[in-house]
Image (spheres, rainbow, N blue to C red):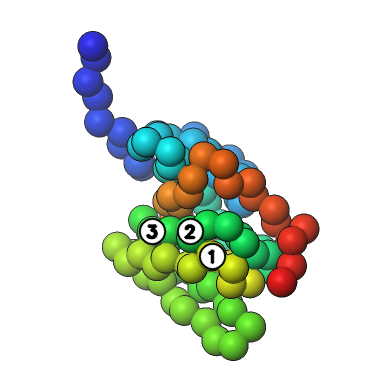
């Protein structure tokens, strides 16, 4: 077996488009994805699962209908299932997501 660590900066350098998550690993029934974000994403909800956001570089904002959270480099936030969210970044931000393999990115197609 060949053992090799995943270097996030190398994987991020391969990503050309914002808001296009790339799979970098799997753990049991979960996937780890990295993504570059900039600007606003659509309001959407994950009705059946929590979602973890870990900021690798920059700062992101997650708006909720009743408030918001700012997540900076080396910070993470877990969005509980069923909450409607609108992620954004004022400048390019690099993040890692962790979610179940069964999770589908709805991108605004399932609003609360």
Q: Which picture quadrant has residue 37?
A: bottom right
* Vertical order, 36 against 26 (above or below): below
Q: Residue 14: horizontal and vertical position, in percent? A: 49, 34
Q: Which picture quadrant has residue 26?
A: top left
Q: Residue at x 77, y 58 (%)?
A: 109
Label 1, secondary structure: give it: loop
Quadrant showing the C terminus:
bottom right
Callout 3: few (<14), some (14-19), or many (20+) C-alpha neighbours within 10 Å? many
Callout 1: few (<14), some (14-19), or many (20+) C-alpha neighbours within 10 Å? few
Q: Residue 98: horizontal and vertical position, in percent? A: 43, 50
Q: Residue at x 44, y 60 (%)?
A: 53
Label 3 and label 1: CA atoms lie apart by 17 Å
* Vertical order, 37 against 82 (above or below): above
Q: Which residue is mark 3?
A: 54
Quadrant showing the N terminus:
top left
Is residue 78 toward the left or the right of residue 65 in the image?
Answer: left
Q: Earlier in the sequence, mark 1 or mark 2?
A: 2
Residue 81 - label? 1
Q: Residue 61: horizontal and vertical position, in percent? A: 51, 73
Q: Which residue is mark 2?
A: 51
Q: Nearer the viewer, mark 3 or mark 2?
A: 2
Is residue 21 toward the left or the right of residue 58 in the image?
Answer: right
Is residue 35 toward the left or the right of residue 1 in the image?
Answer: right
């Amino acid at each position: 077996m060949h053992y090799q660590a995943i270097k996030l900066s190398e994987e991020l350098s391969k990503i050309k488009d914002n808001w296009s998550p790339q799979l970098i690993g799997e753990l049991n029934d979960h996937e780890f994805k990295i993504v570059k974000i900039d600007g606003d994403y659509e309001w959407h909800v994950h009705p059946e699962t929590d979602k973890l956001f870990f900021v690798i570089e920059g700062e992101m904002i997650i708006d909720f209908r009743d408030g918001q959270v700012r997540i900076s480099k080396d910070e993470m936030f877990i969005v509980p299932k069923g909450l409607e969210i609108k992620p954004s970044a004022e400048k390019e931000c690099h993040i890692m997501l962790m979610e179940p393999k069964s999770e589908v990115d709805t991108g605004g197609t399932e609003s609360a």
